[in-house]
Image (cartoon, helix red, strand yellow):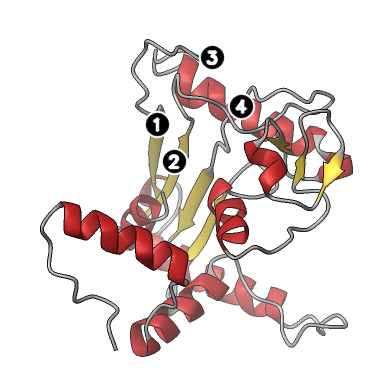
Amino acid sequence: LGDYPTMMAAEGMIGMITADSGAAPKHVAPFGGIARKLGTNPICIGMPSNLDGPVLMDMASSTVALGKIALARSRKEEIPVGWIVDKDGNPTTDPNDYYSGGAILPVGVDQGHKGYALSFMVEVFSGLLTGLGFGIDPEGRHNDGVFIAAFNLEHFRPLEEFKKEMGEFVEFIKDSPPAAGFTEVLYPGEIEWNREQARRKDGIFVEDETWAQLSGLMKSLNIEEEVGQP
């Protein structure tokens, strides 16, 4: 989702977007429950600034995005406690338990009522408000519901004044001494910006199983396999 609020921010607007999973199968259990009733339901907000990278919050309202569970599974790695529960509602570190009827938890784990509330509101904005609806319909359309809003900053205050103060606010936040295990405080979106610059320079690592799947797809579509080769 991050591309769209980033584009809005580049045009001097605050960009906000939420998305749900439409009538497709769900992934996330509500706080206090164990059945999959919600999507990972991301929320993304971008702010204009004069910083090198975008000030961008782009997050799932679940503890983790489904892709990270799939990645751990393909790498045969355990996942942290608090990401998922198994089909009986027990905490587990085995990503395979998700694919055996488990569920992802809302962000916040033991304080998951907060992530659950965010996810609930994403469903309202993206599903109910748009008219797409909610729930699971095996016979229905599985396109996602999306809510997009752009706030023209000039209707609130001068844009350049806002950008300047945003930079000052970031400096104020980053001036905090780092906690143990950290080297600095980052503003929202900064770590993703840093990774993007590094990967543009050095490339993106893709594990063998994922590359094999991509290679098979390219061959089925008669696409020459060039990307990612040494």
Label 2 neighbourhood size at 10 Å, few (<14), some (14-19), many (20+)? many
Residue, disc 1? 146
Q: Which residue is mark 2?
A: 17
Q: Position of residue 83 (x, y in %)?
A: 75, 48
Task: Find the distance from the CA under tag 3 to the CA under tag 4.
Answer: 8 Å
Tell me the distance, in whole angstroms, between the alpha carbons under discs 1 and 2: 7 Å
Q: Quadrant of residue 98?
A: top right
Q: Are marks 1 and 2 in contact (CB under 8 Å)?
A: yes
In the rendered structure, the answer to whether residue 38 lies left or right of residue 181 reads left
Residue 38 circle label: 4
Q: Is residue 78 above or below residue 201?
A: above
Q: Earlier in the sequence, mark 2 or mark 3?
A: 2
Which is closer to the viewer, label 1 or label 2?
1
Q: Would residue 102 be seen by someone viewing this image from the given angle?
A: yes
The local secondary structure at tag 4 comes to loop
Nearer-N-terminus badge (1/2)? 2
Tag 4: residue type?
Leu
Q: Position of residue 13 (x, y in %)?
A: 37, 52
Mark 1 belongs to which amino acid?
Val
Number of the front mark, 4 or 2: 4
| Local crowd size for mark 4, using a 10 Å CA cut-off: few (<14), some (14–19), many (≥20) | many
Q: Secondary structure at mark 3?
A: loop
Labelled disc at residue 135: 3
What is the spatial separation of the Cα atoms under label 2 and label 3, in whole angstroms?
A: 20 Å
| Residue 21 falls left or right of residue 203 | right
Name the residue located 31 percent from the left edge and 60 percent from the top edge: 214
Label 1: how many residues lie within 10 Å, few (<14), some (14-19) or many (20+)? many
